[in-house]
Amino acid sequence: MTKRMEGNWSIASMVIYEYVRLINCLEKKMETASESSLEPMFPPMIRIARKYLNIALKCDTIVMATFLHPAWRMMLFTKRFTSATTRITVLINSKFIEREALLESMKPPTPPPKPSQSDENLNEPSDSEGDEFNFYPSNPDALEINTKLERYNNGDFPMDKKGNLLGWWKAHAKDFPVMASLARDYHACAASLATVERTFSAAADVCASGRAGLAVRTIERCISSHMWLCDGVRLKGEFANCQSVFDAAAESANFKKRTNEANKKANADKAKAAKAQAEKGKK
């Protein structure tokens, strides 16, 4: 499970699903191993898995990330965790209202609209006989429903659990602007993740040893550019001239020779450092 959850992608939204899947798998194996020597080992494993599942359900960050996965939304909680749906619904509504207010406060103030002739006639007495033909009177006691959340929970624009989560939110940010803003935060990759630390370590030649002295945005650009080049992403627009330089260098035998030598040296240094670390651990 740990290996499946590891990687350069948003994993918080998959934690609850993976625990549910693990528990279901263990329960099926326990039934298969009924009255065998393996049966006693399954109850403790299931108990521990449920313990961590309950911890995950109490974590607001994991709950919000799960809700903001288009494959789960509210249905995963409704189907599997009915006792927690009230608390989760309150949490989601509060986060939505809080973020909506924040986004509204960041907008420039709009001038008040000029009253039109139809607006001026709203308060004038109607020609109809009383309220006989007023079929939709205002009801101050009506329950206010968050139509934006309701539309999201209805399953608009469905996506499979193996789909591109960040790509989905990028495509539908205009359909759900408030939740897209939340998704950007809850599906972000924390800098404390092991995979991010490995990225920093692998990019040591890019960021130099004094990376703490670089601005966050500078490091981000350096690593992103380095990874794009490694993946063979071709440069366009303002960087088209740079791409022509790379193409010319790639055709040079001398460049290939020096690149191979540099790669061999880098791999040798990594192996040497790993060996030294292993020997230090034994001591």
Image (spheres, rainbow, N blue to C red):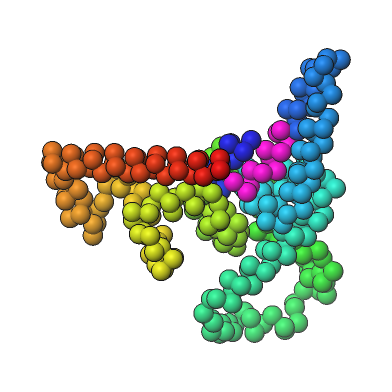
Q: Is residue 31 visible?
A: no
Q: Viewer-proximal residue, 216 or 136?
A: 216
Image quadrant holding the N terminus, namely top right
Is 242 left, or right, of 215 in this rendering? left
Q: Viewer-proximal residue, 106 or 49?
A: 49
Q: Quadrant of residue 254?
A: top left
Magenta-tinted stretch: 11-22
Q: Name the residue rendered at 23%, 40% in the picture.
A: 261
Residue 116: % across, % down: 58, 82
Is 75 left, or right, of 272 in this rendering? right
Is 227 left, or right, of 158 in this rendering? left
Is 164 left, or right, of 153 in this rendering? left
Image quadrant holding the C terminus, namely top right
Q: Name the residue rendered at 36%, 48% in the picture.
A: 227
Q: Viewer-proximal residue, 216 or 121?
A: 216
Q: Name the residue rendered at 29%, 39% in the picture.
A: 264
Q: Is residue 273 visible?
A: yes
In the depicted structure, whether residue 151 falls above or below residue 115 = above
Q: Quadrant of residue 216?
A: bottom left
Question: Does the magenta segment cover residue 70?
Answer: no
Q: Name the residue rendered at 75%, 78% in the picture.
A: 126
